[in-house]
Amino acid sequence: MTPTPPRSSFVTALAWTFLVLSGLGSVIGVLQNLMAHMLMLPMMRNDPLHGEAMAQLPGPAALMFDAMPWFFLMTLAVSLLGVVASLGLLKRRPWGRRLFIALMGVLIAWQVAGFVFQLVLQRDIQATFAGSGMPPESGIVFVIMQCPSAFSPQRSSACSAGSSTA
């Protein structure tokens, strides 16, 4: 009989950590889907002003509201896939390792795409509110939202301008 090689404690800890996080994400995903499909969608369908309100939203915001149920469903699917990948990694299966690595790549791409979408959405919402006649003091909300994501010179100048006027 061949002796089994010792198991890496790093892989075990990684698998258990992601198993717990994916499990919690799955519970949250189930609750989000219940909320979206049982509460939010029926209320939106029964609201006669829903179509008017959606027509006034900028493109990315309307897309976000239209795709929200699908986003919740994808979040649940990715969390459940994370549970499967973590179990495969914990059992030291080759498919578990490959699935775990692929899932990490998908999640990194998801975060980058979400960041870009956030920037586009924020720009469009700012442009929508700029011509709405809101008082100039309300612009501080957008400056505060921009400060944590000061990755461009334009954004960092907005933060310094916002801090000097506050």
Image (spheres, grey):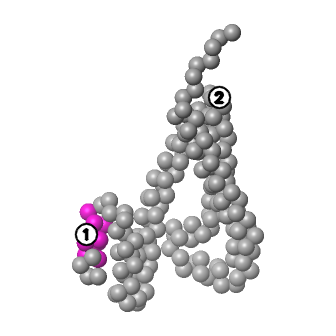
**In this rendering, the label closer to the viewer, 2 or 1:** 2
- In the figure, 49 relative to 126: above or below? below
Q: What's the residue at 40%, 90% (across, down)? A: 133
| Front position in the image: 17 or 153 | 17
- In the figure, 89 relative to 25: above or below? above
- In the figure, 105 relative to 75: above or below? above
Residue 49 x/y as whole percent? 65, 84
In what quadrant of the picture does the N terminus appear?
Answer: top right
Q: Which residue is mark 2?
A: 93
Magenta segment boundaries in residue numbering: 153-162
Residue 137: in magenta span: no
| Front position in the image: 159 or 45 | 159
Residue 73 shows in this picture: no
SS for callout 2 = loop
In what quadrant of the picture does the C terminus appear?
Answer: bottom left
Residue 45 x/y as whole percent? 72, 76
Give the main secondary structure, helix, strand or loop, of the magenta stretch: helix
| Front position in the image: 80 or 46 | 80
Look at label 1 and name its amino acid. Answer: Ser
Look at label 2 and name its amino acid. Answer: Arg
Q: Is residue 39 left or right of residue 63?
A: right
Q: Which residue is mark 1?
A: 157
Q: What's the residue at 58%, 78% (across, down)? A: 55
Please identify the quarter of the rendering in which residue 99 is found.
Answer: top right
SS for callout 1 = helix
Q: Is residue 98 left or right of residue 58?
A: right
Residue 114 shows in this picture: yes
Label at residue 138 = none
Residue 146 x/y as whole percent? 37, 69
Residue 159: in magenta span: yes
